[in-house]
Image: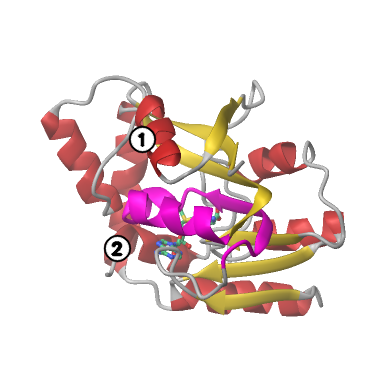
């Protein structure tokens, strides 16, 4: 299904396209003890910034998947330039082409909210090893959202629902994921720093307008809509 907000990120080629950006990614992953023989899935990898970091920093076995062809193309280009041994593939988090118990670590940075949340979490739980971990950065409602606000945000991002932190934890549990912890984010973190872009040629004006609209919406609603980092496992 097409999503204009995700097209915007893809055409502009924005890396670290999640709240907290790449600084958050590094601070989360630096606390993980990832071994070279471990298999890591970066699901909804976007332009591949996190996948590149994972392989450079930990020399682990990285697979990067996204369902947007332009994202996949840009991620492949980045990783080829770096000569980084990362498998980059087009795929859908709701229906992954991997056998059960495939990955030691799965990272999903601002991805699941754009999908059928329950279905994606079930699928990630299936491909996660029984002693593996899932880390997610996801959008959260930080206060009760009026119906109008919900509708505006859902239209803007092309999503079905905005969960609060308790609802995320419930969905994780329902998908068979346990020991859910919320990783606290570093203080002083910039909400959305953008310093990694790879724009396509001939970006449609509508996408510039959507970007403006998005920035305005974020500015006016930063108390209502936030994000959380969740870490959980299967056992
Ligand atoms: C907000 S962007 C985040 C990209 C990347 N994780 C990052 O932080 O830069 C969301 C990404 O999820 C991808 N995505 C959305 N739905 C997906 C699905 N069903 N399967 C795989 N990837 C998906 C989008 O194409 C996009 O690249």
- Give me the disc on residue 4: 2
Is the residue indicated by label 1 positioned so its CB lies within 8 Å of ligand 1? no
Measuring 51% from the left and 58% from the top, which residue is drawn there? 126
Q: Nearer the viewer, residue 209 or 118?
A: 118
Which residue corresponds to the image point at 44% horizontal and 40% vertical from the top-left?
A: 172
Q: Tell me what residue is drawn at x 27 percent, y 51 percent.
A: 159
Sequence-first tag of 2 and 1: 2
Residue 5 x/y as whole percent? 34, 57
The location of residue 230, given as percent across then percent down, is: 55, 35
Is residue 58 left or right of 4 when viewed as pictured? right
Which percent across, then down, holds residue 2? 28, 69
Horizontal relation, residue 11 to residue 42: left or right = left
Residue located farthest toward the left when viewing the structure as drawn: 148
Is residue 132 magenta-colored?
A: no
Nearest the camera: 179 or 140? Answer: 179
- Quadrant the N terminus occupies: bottom left
Q: Is mark 2 within 8 Å of ligand 1?
A: no
Magenta-drawn segment: 100-127
Tell me if mark 1 has few (under 14), some (14-19) or many (20+) residues whose alpha carbon lies within 10 angstroms of its own: some
61 to the left or right of 197:
right
Position of the C terminus, as image quadrant, is: top right
Residue 199 visible in the current orientation = no
The reply to whether residue 90 is visible in this rendering is: yes
Q: Secondary structure at mark 1?
A: helix
Tell me which corner region of the image, top left, top right, bottom left or bottom right, holds residue 11. bottom left
Q: Residues within 10 Å of mark 2 (few under 14, many from 20)?
A: some
Q: Is 73 rendered above or below residue 211? A: below
Q: Element at badge 2? A: helix
Residue 218's tag is: 1
Q: Quadrant of residue 180?
A: top right
């Amino acid at each position: 299904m097409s999503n204009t907000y995700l097209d915007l990120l893809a055409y502009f080629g924005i890396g670290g396209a999640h709240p907290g950006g790449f600084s958050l990614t590094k601070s989360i992953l630096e606390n993980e003890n990832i071994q070279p023989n471990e298999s890591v899935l970066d699901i909804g990898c976007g332009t591949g910034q996190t996948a590149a970091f994972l392989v450079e920093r930990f020399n682990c076995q990285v697979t990067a998947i996204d369902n947007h062809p332009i994202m996949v193309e840009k991620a492949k280009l980045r990783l080829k330039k770096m000569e980084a041994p990362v498998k980059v593939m087009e795929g859908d988090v709701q229906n992954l082409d991997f056998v059960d118990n495939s990955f030691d670590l799965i990272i999903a940075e601002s991805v699941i909210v754009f999908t059928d949340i329950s279905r994606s979490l079930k699928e990630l739980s299936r491909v996660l090893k029984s002693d593996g971990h899932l880390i997610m950065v996801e959008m959260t409602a930080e206060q009760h959202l009026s119906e109008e606000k919900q509708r505006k945000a859902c239209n803007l991002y092309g999503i079905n629902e905005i969960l609060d932190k308790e609802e995320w934890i419930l969905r994780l549990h329902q998908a068979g994921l346990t020991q859910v912890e919320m990783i606290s984010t570093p203080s002083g973190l910039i909400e959305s720093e953008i310093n990694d872009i790879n724009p396509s040629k001939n970006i449609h004006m509508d996408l510039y307008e959507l970007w403006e609209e998005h920035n305005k919406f974020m500015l006016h609603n930063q108390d209502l809509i936030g994000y959380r980092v969740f870490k959980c496992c299967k056992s």
